[in-house]
Amino acid sequence: MPKFLCVQRSLPATDDRPAPSPTEMQAMYAKFNEWRETFSSQLVDLGGKLGDGRLVTEEPITDAPFVEVKELVGGYMIVEADDLEGAIEVARGCPGLVSARSGVEVIEIHIPGG
């Protein structure tokens, strides 16, 4: 079954998109646990938030400002689905992943020789 990388793009909080309250977060986590059970057979790797990292190049680069990946990407997960639409359905169902404050890119993973 094809695998898909789901890359969460967090959007900054604004007056139109305030950060959720603790009560809203608790409700979202409860919905997340229900979603995780519903799609457990398709969730290959729930991923998570990204931490510190470094760009690796052939020659060390020290004189440029770099955007940190964790500023662009809120997190990731890998799902299995029959096709792109099926993977989108799984990602769209994840509470808090697709909202006014975040979106998700769903990308098929091509495995060489697979």
Image (cartoon, helix red, strand yellow):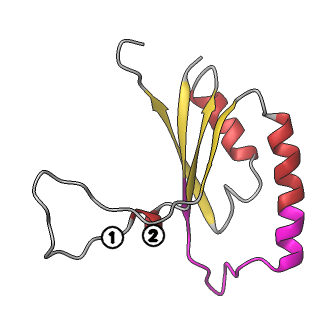
Decide whether residue 14 is among the magenta residues. Answer: yes
Instruction: Pick the residue in front: 38 or 104.
Output: 38
Work out which residue is located at the far left of the displayed protein and give it. Answer: 59
Q: In the rendering, at what x and y percent does residue 88 appear? A: 63, 38
Q: Residue at x 60, y 16 (%)?
A: 1
Q: CA distance from mark 1 to mark 2?
A: 7 Å
Give the number of callouts. Answer: 2
Which amino acid lies under the numbered mark 2 shown in the image of this protein?
A: Glu
Query: In the rendered image, which quarter is residue 60 located in?
Result: bottom left
Q: Secondary structure at mark 1?
A: loop
Disc assigned to residue 37: none
Q: In the rendering, at what x and y percent does residue 55 appear? A: 27, 59
Q: Which residues are magenta?
A: 8-28
Quick check: 7 left or right of 65?
A: right
Instruction: Pick the residue in front: 54 or 76.
Output: 54
Give above or below for 43 relative to 62.
Answer: above
**Mark 1 near mark 2, Cβ–Cβ under 8 Å?**
yes
Quick check: 93 left or right of 84?
A: right
Which amino acid lies under the numbered mark 1 shown in the image of this protein?
A: Val
Disc assigned to residue 67: 1
Q: Residue at x 39, y 62 (%)?
A: 53
Work out which residue is located at the far top of the displayed protein and give it. Answer: 113
Work out which residue is located at the far bottom of the displayed protein and give it. Answer: 15
Q: Residue at x 54, y 33 (%)?
A: 4
Q: Residues within 10 Å of mark 2 (few under 14, many from 20)?
A: few
* Residue position marked by numbered label 2 in the rendering: 71
Query: In the rendered image, which quarter is residue 74 located in?
Result: bottom right
Q: In the rendering, at what x and y percent does residue 3 appear? A: 55, 27
Give above or below for 88 relative to 72.
Answer: above
Decide whether residue 17 is among the magenta residues. Answer: yes
